[in-house]
Amino acid sequence: MIITEEITRSNRGVFDAVVFANKRIRQRFYRLGLEFSGDGAEAFAKARPGQFAEIDLSGVKLPPMKEVAEDLQDAAERKVLLRRPFSFCEVSSQFTHRSVNEGGRGKTRVEILYCALGPATLRMTTLSAGNSVSVMGPLGNGFRMPADKKMALLVSGGMGAGPLIHLAKTITAECPKVEVTAFVGAKTKTEMPFEKPLDEISRQLGFALHEFARYAVESQLATDDGSIGHKGFVTDCFSQWLGQQRSLSAKDTIIYSCGPEAMLARIAKIAEDKKIDCQVSMERMMACGIGVCQSCAIKCKVEGSNETIYKLCCKDGPVFDGREVVF
Amino acid sequence: MTNCMNETMDISIDFSRLKLANPVFTASGTCGYADELADFTNVNRLGGFITKSVTAKPRQGNDTPRVVETDSGMLNAIGLANIGLEAFIQEKLPLIGKLTTSVFVNVAGETIDDYVAVVQRLATEQAIAGFELNISCPNVAKGGLSFGTDPAQVAEITSAVKKAAGEKVLMVKLSPCVTDISVIARAAVEAGADALSLVNTFTAMVIDIETRKPVLSNRTGGLSGPAIKPIAVYMVNKVYNEVAKERGIPILGLGGIRTASDAIEFIIAGASAVAIGTANFIEPGCTVKIIEGIKKYCAHKEIKNIRELIGSLV
């Protein structure tokens, strides 16, 4: 019997997670699966879309040098000291009523999309089922749910798709009346963090990607070179689509975005022009992830003045209101 | 049996006028004002806690990037971003007052008056055991490191702050970016410093070879982490031998400590206590492990009082 039980333990902490999968999706893109038990399972069961975890990869072995792409060999020589932040593309929990003494309360599985492009993520590729890693989290503030909206528009670039998949699942589960549509951008067909886009017919029906279609969420794909989906930036594809929506009500709509900062800036501008609420997930180099090192500053506007202040990506974000960030 | 010994093992130390439960502190700027750490570690297990720098007025800090990782270390150029004295008193001090560990407030400023203003205002606060005078921040345009590299200025600022500090313990944090750190240490002690903490970070640079620009927006930053540990151990030993030992001035040793054996190296070199900095970012609970590790070492080596270990370098 599997039932969700009320969770009252700590909200976050440092936990050991066991790898249950680490699959190469294509090229440099991978999907890592981590399983938590005990307190970790309880803490991560509450992980919200847009939140993140800091993973210690310093002790993970490198792939053999001959398997490392030439342009990453310098990076592979670097050591890793600090944890690395990752958001989640999938969180699922199973809890039972068994007591702790009877062998654990449940399990939470967290999946992470990542791209091997530096010393830490190269190490990450060698993790295999059964390996253990230290994970700190869940951290930061995720996307706020569109409870008072009728339509949620998700716009991602590159690896930014990860947390928006998690968001699509969560909105469809928690706000079933909200219509969700995703716009997914990548540089090229091969630089997409997805296993395989759906066939031409599905794409024409508005379901380009299985990762969103599984939650009955429509998705459109754009690549810079047009190797699949619309040719050009996802922001142009999105803007064009938005322009065609004659009956769209700005106040009943919200835009969620995650991806490169230039893309977020463009999305925030489109949203502002159309007077649509917008939340953007930001990224900064960070050391601690919990607001003590003050590294990950994001310049933000102060409402009702021309002044700016720094907020912290890890603690005040990573999700910010699109209107508040100074890009 | 060993575990039992660990539990009861006394590693308390005298640190100037303070009696501390153990010799492990957290370093300034790596643990905020303690409230941020509540979910990750028990701050009350620490011998001492040092706050993020407090300046008279709030400071926004530098543009990003403010940090970059290097092999075995990291550079930071935060620029003393902090909430300022008034917000510290209103928002943080009540929580700090509830801690049972000894709390030092790290104080920074652009002028001597800035430092004095902060110290004077906090000198009567029960919640605070002492001050750490930050005259060695490498990441600000005015004040900071410029105070800490000239012995005459070190003496002037230390004696001005000492007058304002009242009964509180005054610790001066030294920069390693000097020709002879003992000269600076002597200037601080002769001007009234009750304790010394060393070392702050080393001024350093990382360059992006694609753009040929420094990675940090501040261009340079302070190097911390395991990379600096052997230099810090050497400097602690030098200051212990040349300045601190004969005058009975305790040293808080820091620089790249992340294990109990790292901490013990500093103590053997002459530190009465140690502070953990960068390692908190990786493992916020590491200080508790280090305290346990020191107890284990003392039990194993049959050291009855940790004072036997301080400066015991052969």
Image (cartoon, grey):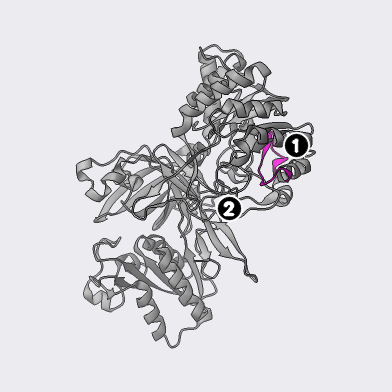
Q: What element carries label 1?
A: helix
Q: Which residue of the protein is positioned furthest toward the bottom in this rendering?
A: A246
Report how far apart the C-alphas of labels 1 and 2 lie in the structure. Answer: 26 Å
- Few, some or many residues within 10 Å of mark 2 (<14, 14–19, 20+): many
* Residue type at the position of mark 1: Ala
| Front in this rendered view, residue A263 or B212 | B212
Q: Where is residue B70 in the image (x, y as percent from the top left)?
A: 41, 41
Residue extent of the magenta highlight: B96-113
Examine the structure image and report whether residue B192 is included in the region drawn in magenta: no
- Which residue is pictured at 40% across the width and 79% down the height? A239
Per the image, the residue denoted by label 1 is: B160
Chain under callout 1 = B
Q: Position of residue A84 (x, y in %)?
A: 42, 47
> Which mark identifies residue B61?
2
| Front in this rendered view, residue B145 or B20 | B145
Mark 1 or 2: the one toward you = 1
Q: Is residue A65 left or right of residue B300?
A: left
